[in-house]
Image: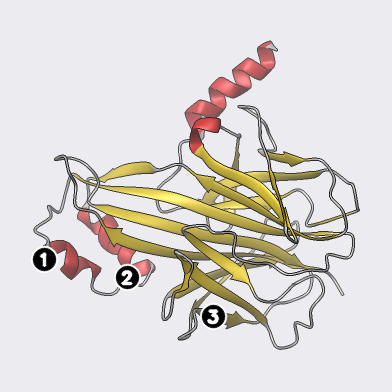
Amino acid sequence: MYLRSLSLIFSLLVSVPVYAHEFWISPVKYEVSVDEPIEAHFRVGQGFNGSGQSFLSRQTARQEVVQGRQTTQVTGRNGDRPAFQHSGLSNGLAVLVHETTDSSLTYKDYEKFLKFVTHKSFEGQPEAHQARGLPEVDFRESYRRFAKSLIAVGDGAGKDMSVGLDIEIVALTNPYTDDLSNGMQVRVLMMGQPRPNVQVEVFQRALRETGEVQISLHQTDADGVAKFPVTAGQEYMIDSVALIPIDPEVKGNPVWHSLWANLTFAVPTD
């Protein structure tokens, strides 16, 4: 009990979301047997490398596992590691879902804001910031994370689908069962509608390795769909971000709000 208490205190100190870093669900195993327990870490970092985070109820807005038409709420205890734990499931594709609560940051350096909007390909955002008469320092942004992960239970057959997140990435291809010779397809949705002509960032590395990560940028088409090649024996993280303006009711409140969609999955070894 004493060690668990120390672990929880430490997690409260280190689990504050790090701005402009990805947040993703990192399964202990992407493929599990029927009825085998499912465990996954929450990670925050850059370049598909990040530290594990504990489950914290105050930072959790939604957590569940979706399999077919069945949605099961997943509760955790503060300090749990791995943060996502669930008893075994029946055969088929399982989708782990996690939504954080809002966090916020204060920009002390306008260059950091410019680098962020440039990297995420938010065209016209610097001009929009200036047009609103916003300051270049000491302005705030709130942000929220919406993460999903695909796990194959048994043969992994099934389809991903929209689970109603404010922003989400839906896999149109099942990486565990479908023919991937023509690549992987995903659709980016926001408030249930496709997001056309937005950036999708793809991270890949050898499954269960911590070595070199390959990063590529893609664009959704008019239907919000992005397509990219995948390789057997690799794990993938897909990231897409939206930035919307906020009119603060109280001086000092956030003036921007970012929504981060993330999807992880693996392509089995041939």
- Compared to 10, does 51 lie above or below? below
Furthest-bottom residue in view? Answer: 182
Crowding at mark 1 (Cα within 10 Å: few <14, some 14-19, many 20+): few
Q: Secondary structure at mark 2?
A: loop
Q: Amino acid at mark 1?
A: Ala
Chain-order first, disc 1 or disc 3:
1
x then y, percent, for residue 110: 21, 55
Quick check: can you spot residue 116?
no
x then y, percent, for residue 51: 58, 43
Residue 213, disc? none
Furthest-left residue in view? Answer: 133
Callout in the foreground (1, 3):
3
The picture quadrant where one finds residue 266 is bottom right
Q: Residue at horizontal 24%, vertical 58%?
A: 111
Residue 225, disc? 3
x then y, percent, for residue 228: 61, 81
* Mark 2 lies on residue: 122
Crowding at mark 3 (Cα within 10 Å: few <14, some 14-19, many 20+): many
Crowding at mark 2 (Cα within 10 Å: few <14, some 14-19, many 20+): some
- How far is disc 3 from disc 2 in space, using C-alphas? 18 Å
